[in-house]
Amino acid sequence: MTAKENAPHQVLARKYRPQGFAELVGQPGVSQTLSNALASGRVHHAYLFTGPRGCGKTTTARILAKGLNCAKGPTPEPCGECVPCREIAASSCLDVLEMDAASHTGVDNVREVIIETVALAPNRDRYKVFIIDETHMLSAAAFNALLKTIEEPPPHVVFILATTEAHKVPATIASRCQRFKFRPVAPDALAEHLAGIAKKERIAVEPEALALLARAAEGSLRDAVSLLDQCRSSGEGKLTLESVRDTFGFVPQEMLVGAAKALLARDAKSMAVWLKKVYEEGVEPAQFLKDLRAALESVYLEALGAGAAAEPVWSEALSGATPEALGFLLRRLNRALEELRYGDSPRLSLELGLFSALEAAHDLGAWLARLEALERRLSAGGGGPALPPAPAASGAAAPPPAAPEPGGASWEAFVEAVGKRKFSLGATLKTCAHEARPDGGWAIRFAKEFDLEMARRAQDLLNEAAAALAGRPALVELAAGGAAPAVPTDIVDPAIPETPGGAPEGARWKDVTEGEGASGGALGKAEGVFGGRARVVKKPR
């Protein structure tokens, strides 16, 4: 049996752990700054590495320790062959002490591992390096014991603190360290790194499968490599997108797309069908909600123009969804995940979360617009007033309104075109004074400043609608000074008779606006809208 065959199996995450700054993935700023510090000899006595799990904090700490103690160093490019480099890589170097603060949280641990040994000279190497992982787990007493040592350490000592929760590290400790922020590794960089490992290990894998693994790792390089290792162990032959989904229980894409379409269509029956498939496939409710949320988020950001393009299948499936609707659904999915986390029935939390998202609340903007439109119709009786002529100079006659060009679109067609794209603005235009421009556009005057500001924010939309109907470039002019809508006289249904004989026997009328003036109080305002006088009938005691 050869030495290679007799060697113990080594997991990919350890086998391909970066051994130099050049091998770090997704942290160019950190690797460059530390390399420059080693090259110039400007090494700080304490470093604080912060960032999410699996992004390279502890690995970088070991690389820095090798750079400090390499036989050819200090150097930004440790050789990896000398005794110090090999021992540090194997976590067996006497001069590089690693302490897991998650399991050694007390002051006694800090005193035993650090305080009592920090004054001793290195056993063999240049520097005594203390690497404290999960630093935020130390107790308050342990931090206090560590403070003086970190503030004034011996010249041969370097501290490297690593944590995933930087806000839990006391400011007195953090302020004495050079701080480096590690960021989640981008999916593209993760997929590229996985492809390189797969090639070295002779693992046949589809690019789509690598992309799925990279997204599932959520920025963690260690998790991504571990997922690939698991796929290699469970798969046979080439790793495909479907085999990866089956291995990790990822939700099939057609199931996610179908559920998303049912949500946007508010189709409860269709949603019930997809939920049945979720149960039949044994998909975890939390996984289903997370995958659905991730897909909707990509389309949401694309719709806002705030992110990269979503996958074509999702962009096509949800092409008619507005950012408002997608934002509402994302909030509902977040709430469902929160309830699922603390509830005792995952299935019920999933059903409540999805079926409640079918409500029309994500069309709240349209509902508000409808209410506003109803208010305007009650106030104006429907159509908008004719545009009064613009004020003319003293002694000059006002020019007649310009007539539309032959073939120009009607006002109703223009309002309808705008309403299809922005319902609330279309409803507002129905009550506005207006006149046609020679270029096929419109001059519009608004009675309310609020409505004018809303229209100004949609100036491009108005111009596009006018140009599309006119068949040529057209301009829409917006201005204040429109006439207030006339108060209608036919709001009250004449088919409803007055109380025969006036007030009921024993009742008495009371004018609640007495002393407030004709327009005083809430009832006075109601009189201004509906006309007449407001009276209250009190029942006899």
Image (cartoon, rainbow, N blue to C red):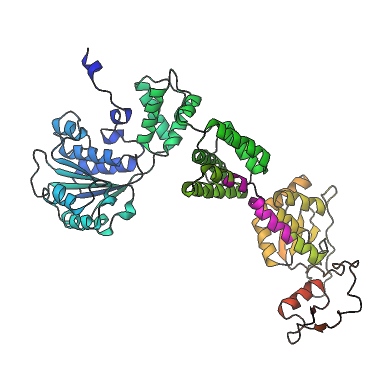
Q: Position of residue 12 (x, y in %)?
A: 32, 28
Point 14% across, 49% down: residue: 112
Point 77% across, 56% down: residue: 442
Point 54% across, 40% down: residue: 292
Closer to us: 111 or 420: 111
Q: Main secondary structure of the magenta part?
A: helix
Left or right side of 78 for 405: right
Q: Quadrant of residue 151?
A: bottom left
Q: Position of residue 208 (x, y in %)?
A: 49, 27
Q: Quadrant of residue 400?
A: bottom right
Instruction: Please say whether residue 250 is visible from this viewpoint.
Output: yes
Instruction: Please say whether residue 439 is visible from this viewpoint.
Output: no
Closer to us: 115 or 538: 538
Closer to us: 158 or 21: 158
Query: Which quarter of the image is occupied by the N terminus?
Result: top left
Q: Residue furthest top?
A: 1
Query: Which quarter of the image is occupied by the C terminus?
Result: bottom right
Please give the range of residues in magenta.
352-372
- Queried whether the magenta region covers residue 356, the answer comes back as yes
Closer to us: 321 or 2: 2
Query: Compared with residue 281, is residue 508 higher up or lower down, i.e. above or below?
Result: below
Q: Quadrant of residue 38?
A: top left
Point 21% across, 52% down: residue: 106
Left or right side of 239 for 403: right
Q: Residue furthest front?
A: 541
- Queried whether the magenta region covers residue 199, the answer comes back as no
Q: Position of residue 164 (x, y in %)?
A: 33, 47
Q: Position of residue 301 (x, y in %)?
A: 54, 45
Query: Compared with residue 105, is residue 500 higher up or lower down, i.e. above or below?
Result: below
Left or right side of 214 for 415: right
